[in-house]
Image (cartoon, coloured by chain):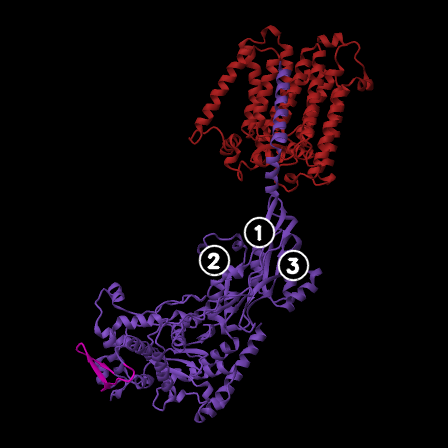
Chain colours: A purple, B red
Amino acid sequence: MVAGLQAGFMSLLALRLRHMQVEQADAFRLLAEENRINIRLIPPRRGRIFDRQGRLIAGNEPSYRITVVREDAGDVAEVLARLAHIVPLTQDDIDRVLAETARSAPFLPVTVADRVSWEDISRVAVNAPALPGITPEVGQSRVYPMGHDFAHVVGYVGPVSERDLERYADPAPILRIPRFQVGKVGVEARYEEHLRGRAGTRRVEVNAVGRVMRELDRQEGEPGADIQLTVDHRLQNYVRARLGQESASVVVMDVANGDLLSIVSAPSYDPNKFVRGISVDDYAVLRDNERRPLASKTVQDAYPPGSTFKMVTALAALEADVITPDETVWCPGHMEVGGRRFHCWKRVGHGHMDLESGLRESCDVYFYDLALKVGIDNIAAMARRLGLGHAFDIPMSAVADGLIPDREWKARTRNAEWRIGDTVNASIGQGYVLSSPLQLAVMTARLATGRDLAPRLVKSVNGVETAPRTGAPLGLNENHLRRIRQAMFTATNNRRGTAYSSRIVAEAMAMAGKTGTSQVRNITAAERRAGVIRNEDLPWNRRDHALFVNFAPFEAPRIAVSVVVEHGGGGSAAAAPIARDVTLQALYGGDPPLEAYPSADRSRIRAQQERLRREREAAEDEDRSRA
Amino acid sequence: MSYLEYTVKTVPAGPRKLLFLNWPLAVTLIAVAGIGAVMLYSVAGGDFSRWAEPQLVRFTAGFGLMLIVAMVPIWFWRNMSVLAYTISLALLVAVEFVGVTGMGAQRWIDLGVMRLQPSELMKITLVMLLAAYYDWLPVAKASRPLWVLVPVLIVLLPTALVLIQPDLGTALLLLIAGGLVMFIAGVHWAYFAGVLAAGAALVATVFQSRGTDWQLLKDYQFRRIDTFLDPATDPLGAGYHITQSKIALGSGGWTGRGLMQGTQTRLNFLPEKHTDFIFTTLAEELGFVGGVTLLFLYALILAFCVISALQHRDRFAQILVFGVAVTFFLFFAVNMSMVMGLAPVVGVPLPLVSYGGSAMLVLMLGFGLVQSAHVHRPR
């Protein structure tokens, strides 16, 4: 009976064996395969970024690091000591590596040194027999050969953070690769999906503790798309040098298609530092600098446009048929509106002013009068038609909307009624009005062409041209536009114009522009009685912003330029000279002949050109030696 | 002087005894040990010296031990039963004080040459003593309560000692083996029905105790039972062993993946692959065919034992041979059930195949007794 029991149990075992091995074999085979096969990702090459001439702005360079594998090294401390003879290693590094190797699995590589120079790597390779377990490894790292010039445009990449993972709805597994880099700001961030490419896969056989036994097969990924910008690296480089340490923005736009030829915020920073992991000290210097090198002022900062806004007011009045260009207004130096006195910048007054002289001499009272006639609704509508008050879709970080105030806006946000004084302030680009340097350049381009141009920063993606926007006509009366342009021309070329000292004398290149000076403080009645303090006597951060917008050449406009110098003082003194230099540089495609400048300025300009040339060469040498 | 000593006239003497060995049984044992060596060679990744060689040395030593035991007349062993049991029991007690702790339990005594597991030795000496007891006891008294109580104590004493090591698997094996020997000896079935009912009640009580302050089993023992009932609940923790084992076993298919080709074994997904889980490797690499072949060889061993026992007319020899066979059966039945997911994971090796000395020597000792009975049977 016991024998029968045993036989019975043995048949049960055999049946069970049959059930598992024959009937369920496929399912178990699959599970066994899942166990042993691991999929490893091969990071794709990140797309490169070029300027409009094909100059590399963001590329990839091999980055070398040295790793150690404990089980191959044997005595890790001994091997590291030998390594320290040929590669600079601190005691801290050695201690860290020893701690890490002791902690991790014996077959896992531990990084000894990162971003090692080629010379060091070669020395390690040559001495390989004496350094068991030490491996020189090659990876890819982002590099920005143009350094500071494109920091705000292209931005930079960095290691994936928790916040990045939250940002993408479905974080691709590739983001989990250790040390994988993603765009953090600028084009690098906005075009992340294009630049990243697709990861390749490598199927490897692993054992139970994850050691790779062999590679089974490999599927190459797809490199990221290359991107070409509309920006001209030479102009960009010149503009940055020209701005120096000013806290300023310059935007140069091609009026034929909206291409941004240059878009510079100054001062700038070196994006390469961020890729390598910026030190706390270096970051603090950038963060605490009152000139805000990290801010992309061209798009993310909005300033009161000041008198550069006067074209909007004038055009609104002309289009609404409430004035004719030749009607005059008497400027006694101030105007009483709603029981409050609004001053003209010229205390003694301009006398009789028409459209041309009003814009040329930037008479405030003339525009107060226009504003009262045309009303805030027309002004706001015209401002929006010209591109103010709304963020353009260009792939930079934190593009600002700016602000064009109207009754509805004030009721909604301030819960207050629109006052006539608000209209008066808005008419000269003060009060609530805010616009970014980019918007001012678009406004100028639209005035110069009468078409609704929009800025374009990316010229092509993977060789496929992005649609340029030549713009549909804005539907503005060409006669009105012509009168405005003429008035802007006289502002720079008439002896009484506010920017006469920054004129271009080469006739084919002549520019038409408008100065602007925007207050960053309220002048109190007490201050006014005591005599308005001159800008130069104020602390830097309370001085006025200097603005200038222009297009050129006057007869056949090719470019529109906007310049904002934070706390620069007056527009004619601080911003217009920069605009002229930039305009000429853009039109001539390099240093312009001195004949383009008025004879009185030539010796000073020559000195400046030579200084900037030296500075740019020195900076380029420095970049090259670092790269 | 017993019946045997008078009736055995034709018992060969001296070296001639070798010719009268149960050779089919011996050859089958060699075959199984051969399979074991091949598997150990495969598990070591083609390294003969790692496990296969020492195991073969042990088997040879065990085989020698079997021959020596076989040469000694069976009645000598019967007379030795009480002493052998007492020594085993003493060792079990000693292991509590001087034992080497391994895998969370005190199980080993280090003898210098080898590490001995007294609980293994007890498996055979327990059977010996029970056989001797029932040989001495008139058959008619076998089912009387008082005469049932004695063997019950003989079984429970070592079982309790093993349980506190703690080694639940071996304790249960001793209990079941002892019970089966008593059943073979003719104890009335009603006792077993009673014990089974009580056992069921005990199991219920044990589960009731979980989480209370009078908890009867250690936490890991409860977890093993949990994972046996549903390995999927904890595939990376306690259920890991059984899940990986089933995957390896199942992926073998009809003919297996070939020696040294089993990915589960080679890549270390399989735990204890050279000891308790070696049958999994065998099934993975040699498939259903290999598994059934081993099962068949085991069945042959059992059959040779049973035939030998039936040919015998001495009660001690009969019960002893049955008892050794039952112990052997329990070894591989529990081990195989465990790796196939039919029983909880209890550390029981696959007899003659798993790497390890104690179990091998004890089994060969047991087969030595079987051979001795065979040689010294009346003809």
Q: Amino acid at mark 1?
A: Ser
Horizontal placement of A415 versus A592: left or right?
left
Q: Earlier in the sequence, mark 3 or mark 1?
A: 1
Disc 3 with disc 1 on a shared chain? yes
How far apart in space, not on screen, are marks 2 and 3 (Cα)?
Answer: 29 Å
SS for callout 2: loop
Q: Position of residue A198 (x, y in %)?
A: 56, 56
Residue pointed to by mark 2: A161
Asked whether B364 or A236 is in front, the reply is: A236
Q: Residues within 10 Å of mark 2 (few under 14, many from 20)?
A: some
Picture layout, residue A54 above or below residue A169: below
- Residue A589 shown in magenta: no
Could you tell me residue B96's position as x and y percent?
57, 30
Residue carrying label 3: A134
Residue at mark 3: chain: A
- Tell me the distance, in whole angstroms, between the alpha carbons under discs 3 and 1: 16 Å
Tell me, yes or no, if residue A186 can be seen here. yes
The answer to whether A328 appears left or right of B153 in the picture is left
Q: Nearer the viewer, mark 1 or mark 2?
A: 2
Tell me the subunit letter for badge 2: A
* Comes first in the chain, label 2 or label 3: 3
Position of residue A527 measured from the top left corner of the image (x, y, whole percent):
24, 82
Residue type at mark 3 is: Ile
A430 with respect to B269 (left or right) = left
Circle 1 chain: A
Asked if labels 1 and 2 share a chain, the reply is yes
